[in-house]
Structures are given as structure tokens and as C-alpha cells.
Amino acid sequence: MPSAVYILNGPNLNALGRREPSIYGAMTLDAIRQACEEKAGALGLAADFRQTNHEGVLVDWVHEAAEGAAGIVINPGAYGHTSIALHDAIRAVAPLPVVEVHLSNIHAREAFRHVSMIAPAATGMICGLGPAGYTLALEAVAARLQG
Ligand code: DQA
């Protein structure tokens, strides 16, 4: 069994494809899941891809990842800008590699999106590259695992 990378998606990302396509593109979350599963397989990993609209569920999944996952790729959605609980959860699972992903370039948008609560606790962050951010994040986790 290859080790799994948890790919966690936060609020409103279930609406991808129909949600503000001029910002988030036309790709659905299910299509992103498929791309992640293919990339993970090519890297000798498995993708455990999940979405929730609830902050506490994301916190629970981060803790669960510490019990055997190879790393975490997380698009926290709007909780990325607000959630001290997620910041603390990511710190609590160190040194597990955690890559934050945003489809859009949060720095080119409204001021309230410029701050990430996750980035200071994460291994790294990718934003503005659309769905490619997810597969690039998987490559980064794989590279970390190889040391
Ligand atoms: C997002 C950016 C967030 O600001 C926003 O709240 C989202 C999506 C992105 O992927 O670009 O829900 O995380």
C-alpha cells in the first residue's frame, strides 16, 4: 500500500466549476481529485482527497493525518484567512509536510485575502496557479519525503 497524502479542501470548494468561474476556473473538484490521484500514483503515493465546509472537521483531519499520512496538501478556502485553530493544528503535526494551496492569487485580490493563517505554520504555499497548484504541491510533498 503506498503512503497516502491527505488532500484537504475547505468551504465552498465543493461548488468549483460553477462558483465564480472567472476566478476559480471551470474545473470541478471531482476533476481536481482525479488529477491528484493520477499524480500521486505517478509519484508512488496515494491521494486521500476530501472536502468539508466545516472548520472543526478540517482540524480533525489534520490530526488524523499525523497517524500515518505522508503529508498534507490543503486548500483551506476562506478558513485560510481566519483559522487560528487550523494554524495550531498544523503546528501540532510538525514535522509532517503541509503545503497550502489556493487556486487564485490571493495577493492580487481583496485585502482580506492577503493574509494566510496557514502559511506561517506550513512547509510552503502555492497560490495563483489554478488546479496545477494541487499537483505541484504533491510533487513538493514527494520531494520532501525523499529528503
Ligand atoms: C481560495 C481562496 C480563498 O480566498 C477563498 O475564500 C476560497 C478559495 C482559492 O482556492 O483560491 O474559497 O482558497
Image (cartoon, rainbow, N blue to C red):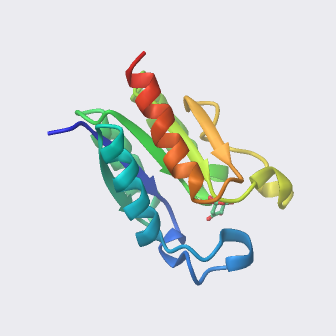
Q: Residue furthest bottom?
A: 18
Quadrant in the picture for the C terminus: top left
**Residue pictured at 55% horizontal, 29% vertical:** 123
Dividing the picture into quadrants, the one containing residue 126 is: top right
Q: Is residue 13 above or below residue 5?
A: below
**Residue pictured at 66% horizontal, 70% vertical:** 24
**Residue 83 appears in the figure:** no
Ligand 1 in which quarter: bottom right
Q: Residue furthest front?
A: 42
Residue 80 at what x, y percent from top left?
Answer: 61, 50
Quadrant in the picture for the N terminus: top left
**Residue pictured at 38% horizontal, 42% vertical:** 62
Residue 6 at what x, y percent from top left?
Answer: 35, 46
Residue 114 at what x, y percent from top left?
Answer: 79, 49
Closer to us: 145 or 73: 145
Residue 117 relative to residue 134: left or right: right
**Residue 72 appears in the figure:** yes
Residue 47 at what x, y percent from top left?
Answer: 32, 50
Q: Residue furthest top?
A: 147
Dividing the picture into quadrants, the one containing residue 142 is: top left
